[in-house]
Image (cartoon, rainbow, N blue to C red):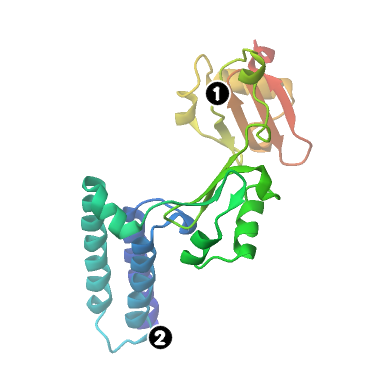
Amino acid sequence: MLNIFVRSIIIYFFLLVAMRLMGKRQLGELQPFEFAITLVASELACIPMSDPTIPIIYGIIPVFTLFIVHIIMTKLASKSVRFRKVLNGKPVVVIERGNILHNVMKELNMDTDDLMEALRGKDVFNPAEVEYAIIETNGSMTVLPKANKRPLCPEDISVEVDRSFMPVTIILEGNFLGGNLSLVDGVTKQRVIKLLDQLNMDSKDVLLLLLQGKDVFVQPYNSDSITLTMEDAQ
């Protein structure tokens, strides 16, 4: 029993490292060949986990081989557009100017329910609102709404807005993330502590503290969230 336990841990961590080296894509973003490699690797790893009579190296070597194959195919795909199209296919338009292309859907083995479900996943409930809908090579759908159906943006009405800032996590579950402070100009740990003092709080009381430009979002553990600015800590 202990032997199986140790073997499982070793193979699990080896498989975890291999998957991490293959990239950070989510399952729904995998290309067909990446999904196939993932399925085969998980199956190969399970065999020596459950059967102690099979040498553990028989699970590690196939997974390592698949990792090498993945790297080679990824490099080839990045250098050759033709190979990439053969390997992954190409995006396909299924809705054009509000019209559903039924013949194209048949080639993709999609039915109308599949199409409508994918549209609803993009917050679109009527194909008439769609200028183009494209099935990407990983099976996801990209939707371009018609001009009169897309959300209004400041540029449409010639309004200038302030630049956007990326939210930076400064405190997470009571712990200061000191390295993140360097991403925010003019903000020091002392200023953040001073701001918390004004709120009668300690860092250990904070579930999450975000800085976005001059704006601060504070979510304490035991009370409602607070929104303020760093100017309040002057």
Image point 55% across, 23% down: which residue?
A: 165
* Up-down relation of residue 15 to residue 133 (above or below): below
Local packing at callout 2 (Cα closer than 10 Å; few below 14, some 14-19, many 20+) is few
Front-lying residue, 153 or 175: 153
Front-lying residue, 214 or 97: 97
Residue 22 percent coordinates (x, y): 32, 55
Residue 225 percent coordinates (x, y): 75, 34
Q: What element carries label 2?
A: loop
Q: In this view, does 36 lie to the left or right of 118?
A: left
Look at mark 2 in the image and give the residue it sits on.
1
Image point 25% across, 51% down: which residue?
A: 82
Q: In this view, does 195 lie to the left or right of 55?
A: right
- Choose top left, top right, bottom left or bottom right for residue 37: bottom left
Residue 162 percent coordinates (x, y): 60, 15
Whether residue 123 is visible, yes or no, is no
Look at mark 1 in the image and give the residue it sits on.
165
